Image (cartoon, rainbow, N blue to C red):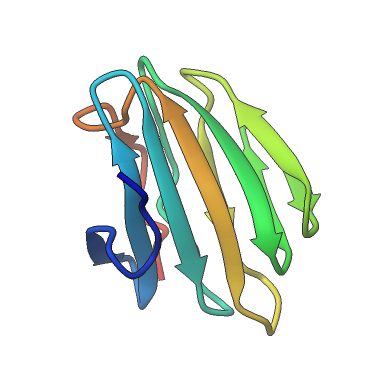
Amino acid sequence: MITDKENAPHYFWGEKCDNWVLADTDGLSVKYESMPYGTKEKLHYHLNAQQYFFILKGSATFYIEDQKVVLSQQQGLLINPGMKHFIANETDQKLDFLVISQPSTNNDRIIINDNEQ
């Protein structure tokens, strides 16, 4: 089955952030996400899942452990299980990206603190 933003299940997270679930099995999750400017997620980690983020539009700031990493459009980043991280849109533009998780992050998200805006 062909999936896209028009027919994929959608939900909101954080403050006005969008998520379209393109694929979701126990072993793999592929999501298209969009973050308005000035938004961020909660600091967290995953016990089992590794995640690959690929920036489609805009610029993303990742806080991973004690490092700040900025990705531009058409760049990607792998985050291994157990790494404390969160993504933020610290620009004045919308941020669109893919997040691919293996296995799925369903029931595998440990929140460290509530830094979400």
Q: Residue furthest left?
A: 107
Drawn side of residue 52 relative to residue 26, left or right: right
Q: How many labels were placed on the picture?
A: 0
Observer-nearest residue: 9 or 61? 9
- As drawn, 100 above or below 70: above
- On the image, the x and y values in percent for residue 27 come to 32, 18
Residue at x-position 19% and y-position 29%: 107
- Can residue 24 be seen here? The reply is yes
- The quadrant holding residue 114 is bottom left
Residue at x-position 36% and y-position 20%: 103
- On the image, the x and y values in percent for residue 7 come to 27, 64
- The quadrant holding residue 52 is top right
Drawn side of residue 110 relative to residue 78, left or right: left
Observer-nearest residue: 80 or 24? 24
Q: Residue furthest front?
A: 1
Residue at x-position 44% and y-position 45%: 43
Observer-nearest residue: 115 or 36? 36
Q: Quadrant of the C terminus?
A: bottom left
- On the image, the x and y values in percent for residue 8 come to 28, 58
- As drawn, 29 above or below 41: above
- As drawn, 102 above or below 5: above
- As drawn, 103 above or below 72: above
Observer-nearest residue: 1 or 105? 1
Q: Quadrant of the N terminus?
A: top left
- The quadrant holding residue 53 is top right
Drawn side of residue 32 relative to residue 68, left or right: left
Residue at x-position 64% and y-position 28%: 78
- Can residue 67 be seen here? The reply is no
